Image (cartoon, rainbow, N blue to C red):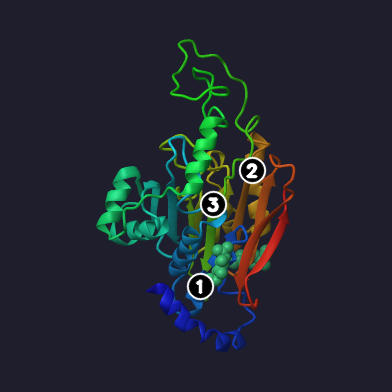
Amino acid sequence: MARRWLLLCAQLLLGVALARSARPLPLVLNTWPFRNATETAWKMLMCGGSALDAVETGCAVCEREQCDGTVGFGGSPDEFGETTLDAMIMDGTTMNVGAVGDLRRIKNAIGVARKVLEHTTHTLLAGESATKFAESMGFVNEDLSTDTSRALHADWLARNCQPNYWRNVIPDASKYCGPYKPPSILKQDGSAYGETGAHYGHDTIGMIAIHKTGHTAAGTSTNGIKFKIHGRIGDSPIPGAGAYADDTAGAAAATGDGDILMRFLPSYQAVEYMRGGESPTTACQKVISRIQKYFPKFFGAVICANVTGSYATGAACNKLPEFTQFRFMVYNSLMEQPVEEKVDCI
Ligand SMILES: *[C@@H]1O[C@H](CO)[C@@H](O)[C@H](O)[C@H]1NC(C)=O
Ligand SMILES: *[C@@H]1O[C@H](CO)[C@@H](O)[C@H](O)[C@H]1NC(C)=O
């Protein structure tokens, strides 16, 4: 329904392009160059949709397109082979949030998050109970596995379940599959997270939309990380971690090593830096630097926008030698189409 409406409205957009003002609002900003998601969010704003509508429909495009295999169904099987989804949406005008974590067998996770926001006074629902909620809201319960996700999981089992996210357990998780148990005398393990870990594809769509009236919204959607422990929830559905929006200061969203990111509430912190007078560039960079002090090899990026439409990104990519720049997508009223931009990793 929403898609057909968008197509009809698209014809109006040529006229709108001529009427663009010098103010760089509205604005759509998202992690990674997911062009169709950016474009759809933009059209939603142009067609009279709210910032929340833009974030929801934009992230939903990635859920359907399985962006990079890291959003939506059929990606990032967990250690049991199941794909589970995390998503959040936040209204920066009312400070209302809806989120789902470890959502099972429902494809449109951000749609369910929107229902949590609209139809409950709760913020975050998780696991099978979130699935039941989604069904009651009219979402279809369906298998999220695909041939691709089944093959990924079979291959991982054949590699003795390497890599995985366990430590200090028996049998030795760096050599064998589980089930694992804690050893009776816990051996001290000095290795910090990320010292041995490779990049397993910790990607997410994080999106910010600012309506021309200055109303902000932010959201995320992801299937987490490959071979995660069953039940793991990342930063994406945690308000202030995966995303944050506040009309009185700005909005931010994050992507990367969620288990690290969520300990620092990077999106909240970036918005607070902007409230304190920092530019989006400095706000994003300061957030990344704070995390790097503890986890020098972590991988993560934060996108930041203030309420007058200035935007920036900060990224740390030390874990990935081949990766020196982080790419993101932006669309504002000064642009004719979504523009892919890059930022050097800190
Ligand atoms: C983006 O949308 C176009 C038009 O619907 C489609 O052909 C293309 O495959 C989409 N891109 C991705 C990455 O899915
Ligand atoms: C947004 O950031 C830009 C660039 O630093 C700055 O010029 C502008 O004043 C900021 N807007 C607000 C509302 O702080």
Q: Is residue 85 above or below residue 296?
A: below
Q: Is residue 307 visible?
A: no
**Residue that lies at the very extreme toward the top in this rendered image:** 185
Q: Identify the secondary structure beneath mark 3.
A: helix
Q: Nearer the viewer, mark 1 or mark 3?
A: 3
For the residues marked 1 and 3, what is the alpha-carbon distance in whole angstroms?
29 Å
Residue of label 1? 211
Residue at the left extreme, as displayed: 136
Name the residue beneath numbered marker 2: 299
Q: Residues within 10 Å of mark 3 (few under 14, many from 20)?
A: many
The x, y position of residue 76, in whole percent, is 50, 44
Q: Which sits earlier in the primary sequence, circle 2 or circle 1?
A: 1
Disc 3 target residue: 69
- The mark tally for this picture is 3
Front one among 58 and 261: 58
Which residue is depicted at the point 42% across and 77% down?
4
Tell me the amino acid under the disc marked 1. Answer: His
Q: Secondary structure at mark 1?
A: loop
Where residue 184 sits, quadrant-wise, is top left
Select label 3 or label 2 by which is in front: 3
Secondary element type, mark 2: strand
Q: Which of the two labelled residues, at mark 3 and mark 2, occupies the earlier sequence position? A: 3
x, y percentage for residue 73?
45, 52
Q: Residue at x 54, y 43 (%)?
A: 258
The quadrant of the picture occupied by the N terminus is bottom left
Report the amino acid beneath label 3.
Gly
Q: CA distance from mark 2 to mark 1?
A: 30 Å
The answer for how far apart the CA atoms under marks 3 and 2 are is 18 Å
Place of residue 89 in the rendered image (x, y in percent of width and height, measured from the top left): 43, 58
Contact flag, marks 1 and 3 (Cβ < 8 Å)? no
Residue name at image x 31 percent, y 44 percent: 128
